[in-house]
Image (tube, helix red, strand yellow):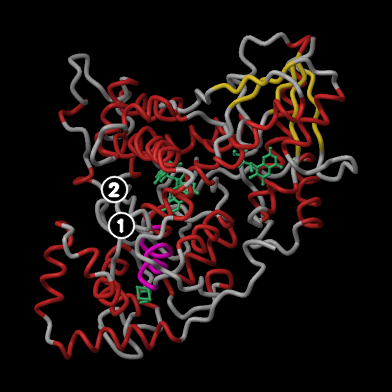
Amino acid sequence: MTTLIPVLGDQLSGTLASLRDQDRATSVILLVEVRAETQYVKHHKKKIALIFSAMRHFAAALEKSGWTVDYVRLTDPANTHNFTSEVTRAAARHAATAIRTVEGAEYRVRQMQDDWSKATGLPVDILHDDRFICSIPEFMTWAQGRKEHRMEFFYRDMRRKTGLLMDPNGKPTGGDWNYDKENRQTPPRGLNYPAPLRFEPDEITQDVLTLVAAEFADHFGDLEPFALPVTRAHAKQALKHFIDTALPDFGRYQDAMIAGQDYLYHSVLSLCLNTGLLEPLEVCEAAAAAYDAGLAPLPATEGFIRQIAGWREYMRGMYWWDMPEFATRNALDAHRPLPDFYWTGDTDMRCLAQSIDQTKREAYAHHIQRLMVLGNFAMLAGVEPGEISDWFLVVYFDAYEWVEMPNVIGMSQFADGGMIASKPYAGGGAYIDRMSDYCGRCRYDVKQKTGPDACPFNALYWDFLARHEDKLKTNMRLRTVYASWNRMTDERRAEYRTSAATFLHTLEPARPGYARD
Ligand code: FAD
Ligand code: DLZ
Ligand code: SF4
């Protein structure tokens, strides 16, 4: 009687449901480096190294604690590089009598798991991933029957469910659910920003770096320097470091963008959460404990917890709510190919060039760079949602389809027609100028509205609103914006549209082969 327990590359948690209450003597854990998973989109080199190194460290830790682990390396000549055929091979190798696994986080992988019983002829127990605060059935119950889905109401339920920042009388701590009015300030000059901890590569990581350099040379991004957390111990240190050094100012400067400051007060914990090295509830509880101990103010703590217990869980729920249709949503009928500069960084628009350069080096950009620079530009320019979604899935170390897709197709492109965001996150140059120091040294002038030297975001913004007036003018949150547009003279409106068209004409489409072979 042997139970085979396949563990996927984003399930690297000792608390995983499939490992719980299992007899180590009669179980074999399977981890596989699968080429198809590295190349269905051609992931950033750092991301592949992160996942392989974390998988290898996790396997070693499991073996040390008495589990039998079958680890199939990328270079194993027998590796078939597909989850289903590797599970089938392993089941035969170990004469398995049953398979026990946790549901894949992505629709694509979850579909594969449905084939495992037929492929192996064995009973397959697919367990819910209870590392998430909200299970998929619980989210479906919440979502069903609601005319409109909004994160804020879901988030309040998660606060009630977990007791995070809740008073004993059932009211939110401090009296409000959300303290954003006290967050999101422009940072003063000369701040001493904390930097995330760096974890120098050990022998396991060095081997992986050599492998990735050899096997994935044509993938986007810089492999080295590599100093990401790859073990549970690293992840716990990274969490403590964030709480000690950055949480107190997290909310205040959450939306700021400063050239040369890649992380500001962000936690950089998404990679740990999304691989399983940290669990969402433990991260939220650590933040709440810092508030209780008087080490972090309430607006920062609440804002941080909302990102994880609110947005992260909500995005996962909405992904499963709408898949598989989510992947092909294109409510604004956008069909422009992705501009080449998303891969090369070769653009005079300094905000984009800076954000892309950082993405290439670090496989990281923070939320406002992703939303209001990289996503905003793609939406204003009318880029095909599937193309920009592929780009986001490739380039970030935390990008897995379940969380990338609702953020990109939903939140940043409005391609879901408003399922996730109540209005498009569209902004002109003034917003970027207010929240960043990018504009001062840009070749474009953020104050000019039209013409060859004007910040392109300005004309693109009005052109976007004009193009989609039929679909968007009834949106209550855009009423004053459309009122301003309609107060402009015909001549002024035409200037905006001509300026946008002239700029859009200069965009070179990306050459094939960056995102997929
Ligand atoms: P912090 O700012 O420190 O936030 C703390 C945590 O909150 C994050 O680690 C993350 O787990 C969670 N979080 C915050 N915002 C979101 C959100 N909107 N959705 C889900 N979780 C959130 N996040 C991913 O994990 N993977 C992605 O592929 C991804 N793609 C994105 C694409 C776009 C266009 C946008 C606008 C956002 C995307 N996000 C994604 C959400 C967010 O930008 C990242 O989670 C965050 O930048 C990660 O950095 P951090 O850990 O420093 O986050
Ligand atoms: C993203 C990724 C990569 C690059 N490589 C592997 C791998 O070799 N083996 C593995 O088990 N998982 C990998 N993953 C994660 C999966 O592609 C997928 O995102 C998750 O399993 C989510 O369902
Ligand atoms: Fe970006 Fe416009 Fe500012 Fe240049 S001027 S950095 S293009 S917002």
Quadrant that contains the C terminus? bottom right
For the stretch drawn in magenta, the main secondary structure is helix
Task: Please state the quadrant of the image where ligand 3 appears.
Answer: bottom left
Reading the image, the residue beneath label 2 is: 252
Reading the image, the residue beneath label 1 is: 187
At horizontal 87% and vertical 25% (from top left) the residue drawn is 93
Mark 1, Cα crowd under 10 Å, few <14 / some 14-19 / many 20+, is some
At horizontal 55% and vertical 54% (from top left) the residue drawn is 393
Q: Which secondary structure lies at badge 1?
A: loop
Instruction: Find the residue positioned furthest to the right.
Output: 77
Report the amino acid beneath label 1. Pro
388 to the left or right of 249: right
Occupied quadrant, residue 15: top right
Vertical arrangement, residue 367 with respect to residue 230, above or below: below
Q: Which residue range is magenta in the image?
A: 371-381
In the rendered image, residue 111, in percent from the top left (x then y), is placed at 60, 37
In the image shown, does 447 or 114 lie closer to the viewer? Answer: 114
In the image shown, does 199 or 14 lie closer to the viewer? Answer: 14
In the rendered image, residue 366, in percent from the top left (x then y), is placed at 44, 53
At horizontal 30% and vertical 59% (from top left) the residue drawn is 425
In the rendered image, residue 201, in percent from the top left (x then y), is placed at 72, 44
In the rendered image, residue 114, in percent from the top left (x then y), is placed at 63, 31
Q: Which secondary structure lies at badge 2?
A: loop
Occupied quadrant, residue 126: top right
Residues at circles 1 and 2 in contact by the CB criterion of under 8 Å = yes
